Each structure stands twice: as C-alpha cells, then as structure tokens.
Image (cartoon, helix red, strand yellow):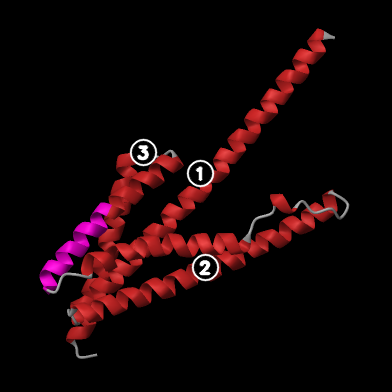
C-alpha cells in the first residue's frame, strides 16, 4: 500500500515537472518570437531610413519614412500573425471536437488577437530605436552616425537575447544578427543611392 502511494506521489511530481517544463518552453518561444519581431522592426525601419536618407537627407523626410515603415510593418506583422494563429485556432478546435466529443477547452486555445497585438508591439519596439536616434539630430552625417550606433547596440542586444532564449552560442548568434543588420542597411543605402543618382 505504501509502495503504491509512493508511486502515485512520484507520478504526480513528474506530471507537475512536465507541466512546468512545457509552460517554460511556451514562454521561451513567445519571448524569442518577440525578440525576432523587434529585430525585424529595427532592421527594416533603419534600412528604410538609411535608404531614403541616401537620396534626401533632411530630418523630416527620414523621420516620415521611418514612421511610415513602423506603421506599415506593425500592421503587416499583426495581420500576418492574426491569420496564422487563427488557422492554428481552427485546427485545434476541430481536433478538440474529435477527441473530446464536441467539448472545447478554451483556456488551451491560442488567442489570435493577443498574438497579433504582441507581434505589432514587438515590431514597433524595434522600429522606434532608429526613429528616436534620428529625431533630434539636424546634421545629416551626424544623424547617420547616431542611427548606426543605436542600431548596432540594439542588434547586439537582440542577438544576445535570441541566443539565450534559443540556447545558441551567444557570440556567433550576436555576430550573425549584427552583420545581417549592417548588410541590410548597406544594400538599401547603396541601391537607393544608385537609383536616385540616375534621376528616378
């Protein structure tokens, strides 16, 4: 009898440990997705501002292009995430109906609206970095330098966070994110400068 009770206690403890591990895994996935969304916002907005700045370097034009990129990107991310998670929601509802005889456990279902809001917020957090960096600098060359410095610091931080959450090598991950961000800005700047110099 005592042995049976001990086995039951061990089974309960193992189930609790599995639940905790699952919850931690889900939180880590959400956090990693948020970091990646913020990185997308950072790189795309900074690249857009650098590209526009290559042709027209006044602060108003760069700020407007960055703001437009923030709004468009956040909306795009939110809509994409909403559609994706809603598809997952429909699949899980259908599966629950088959397995539970029509009963739906709503607390276990993903929230499309929550996912959309989180995605848009993460993108906006990243996109605001180059905007804030450029907002108060009138001199074009100084403004570009400040944007590059702010974006570089943020890229390293996002790379580090992504590596920690994904349990990847920190230095390699941070370097990949940093080089990728620099490359995106350089290509956008170069191609826009090339097109702009031909009077288009």
- Residue 38 colored magenta? no
Q: CA distance from mark 1 to mark 3?
A: 16 Å
Relative height, residue 64 to residue 4 (above, below)? below
**Magenta region: which residues?**
139-153
> How many numbered dots are placed on residues in this image?
3
Q: CA distance from mark 2 to mark 3?
A: 30 Å
Q: Nearer the viewer, residue 122 or 87?
A: 122
Residue 197's tag is none
Mark 2 = which residue? 78
Res. 172 image quadrant: top left
Residue 116 x/y as whole percent: 55, 64
Identity of the residue drawn at 28% across and 48% down: 175
| Number of residues whose C-alpha sits closer than 10 Å to that of mark 1, classed few (under 14), some (14–19) or many (20 or more) | some
Name of the residue lying farthest toward the bottom: 199
Q: Quadrant of the C terminus?
A: bottom left
Q: Which element type, helix, strand or loop, lies under badge 3?
A: loop
Going from the N terminus, do you reach mark 2 or mark 3 first? 2
Q: Tell me if I can see residue 172 in this picture.
A: yes
Left or right of 193 in this view: 126: right
The structure residue drawn at horizontal position 26% and vertical position 65%, both measured from the top left corner, is: 132
Which mark, by number, is residue 28? 1
């Amino acid at each position: 009898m005592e042995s049976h009770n001990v086995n039951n206690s061990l089974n309960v403890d193992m189930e609790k440990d599995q639940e905790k591990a699952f919850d931690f895994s889900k939180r880590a996935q959400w956090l990693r997705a948020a970091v990646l969304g913020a990185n997308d916002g950072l790189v795309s907005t900074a690249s857009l501002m650098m590209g526009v700045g290559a042709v027209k370097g006044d602060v108003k034009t760069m700020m407007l292009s960055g703001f437009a990129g923030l709004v468009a990107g956040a909306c795009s991310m939110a809509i994409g995430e909403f559609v994706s998670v809603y598809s997952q929601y429909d699949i899980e509802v259908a599966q629950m109906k088959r397995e539970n005889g029509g009963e739906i456990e709503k607390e276990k279902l993903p929230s499309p609206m929550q996912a959309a809001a989180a995605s848009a917020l993460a993108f906006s957090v990243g996109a605001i970095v180059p905007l804030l960096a450029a907002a108060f600098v009138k001199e074009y060359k100084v403004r570009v330098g400040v944007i590059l410095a702010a974006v570089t610091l943020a890229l390293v931080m996002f790379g580090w966070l992504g590596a920690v959450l994904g349990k990847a090598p920190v230095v390699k991950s941070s370097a990949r994110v940093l080089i990728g961000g620099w490359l995106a800005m350089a290509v956008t700047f170069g191609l826009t400068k090339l097109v702009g110099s031909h009077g288009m």
